Amino acid sequence: MSSASTLIRRTAIRDYGVYLALIVLVVVNVVITPNFITTDNLRTQLVQVVPTLVVALGMALVIGTEGIDLSVGSVMAIAAALLPLYLGYGVVASILVCLVAGALAGLLNGSLVTFAGVQPIVATLALLVGGRGLALVIANGQLKQLYNPDLLALGSSSVIGIPLTVLVALVLVVIVALLVERTTFGRQLVAVGGNRRAAEFAGLPVKRTLLTVYMLSGVFAAIAGVLASARLTASDPSSLGLLIELSAITAVVVGGTPLTGGRVRVIGTVAGALLMQLISATLIKHDVPASVTQMLEAALIAAAVLVQRERRNGR
């Protein structure tokens, strides 16, 4: 009986721990943080979490195949650098250029993993370093102010009181959830992450699936770069997206998607991103150094991996 109750408890922590932690953090903030439950503060938290959430959605797909994408921050920077260069052709054209650049970056990562057999952490680490340099070259190492009113409206306008960037993120959440849960591609993704060799023997399009998830991760990172630039009214490839890969990985893992692949928890990823945002905001409001946030992220990843390890070992 004790063993059964222990198993139930561990399963509950694994599957619902992120939601419980989020609820507890909200309650704590209501008690100790002045003006936490205000429209302006809630709006601010939602707007600020958008880039991390969007990147985390793409990261969840990659991790679902037992991969990793460390290049997402640099892809955001590349998108930010390209954005002002093509605004003369219209906002839509400029954003499309950014998305194509993100897809190409993902294609490069996916090709190294799929065809060259490079480990995902090594393949994407190369673009993490080189991509930021490329972005700085494109922008001549300069921050550029954005003045296009249509683009700035993307970062500042609202629909029925909800910030447009938040609505974009919600649409992407729905798309990814449907992709994972309701499509053949989603089932193939999970199968590849669960056992790649078995998926190959079963005749599944393993290489195409891997290429697709890395390209989607690149596109999502580019979208995050566009949204962040529009909100900040500036293109700053030197700092945009720095270390966002760590926050995204934390959100995905804490949200219940195992680093060993074979599963993607989209709603858990959303909760994980919100949890990371609230932790950071809480520490800032109480004058705690930002370095503490990074240590907490490391602790959360370690705890989540430990829970996943216990699940694999059947303990």
Image: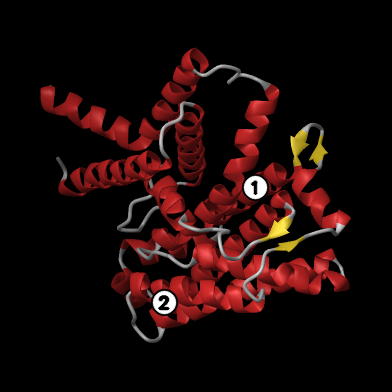
Give the residue number, with chain letter if any, for mark 1.
169
Picture coordinates of residue 300, whole percent (x, y)? 32, 41
Of residue 164 and residue 239, the one placed in the foreground of this image is 239
Q: Is residue 137 visible?
A: yes
Residue that appears at 36% across and 32% down: 17
Asked whether 99 or 83 is in front, the reply is 83
Secondary element at tag 1: helix
Pointer 1 local density, CA inside 10 Å: few below 14, some 14–19, many at least 20: many
The image quarter containing residue 82 is bottom right
Secondary structure under tag 2 reads helix
**Amino acid type at mark 2:** Ala
x and y percent of residue 6 in the render?
Answer: 18, 27
**In which image quadrant can residue 279 be found?**
top left
The 10 Å Cα crowd at callout 2, few under 14, some 14 to 19, many 20 or more, is few
Given residues 87 and 224, the one toward you in this image is: 87
Colouring mode (rainbow / by chain / secondary structure / one colour): secondary structure
Q: Residue at x 38, y 43 (%)?
A: 291
Amino acid identity at mark 1: Ala
Residue located 40% across and 85% down the image: 115
Q: Nearer the viewer, mark 1 or mark 2?
A: 2
In the depicted view, which residue is nearer to us: 165 or 132? 132
- The label on residue 126 is 2
Tell me: 268 left or right of 83: left
In x, y percent, where is residue 120? Answer: 36, 72
Q: What is the quadrant of the N terminus in the image? A: top left
Q: Residue furthest bottom?
A: 116
Mark 1 or mark 2: name the one nearer the start of the chain.
Answer: 2
> Which numbered circle lies on residue 186?
none
**Height in image: 19 above or below 132?**
above
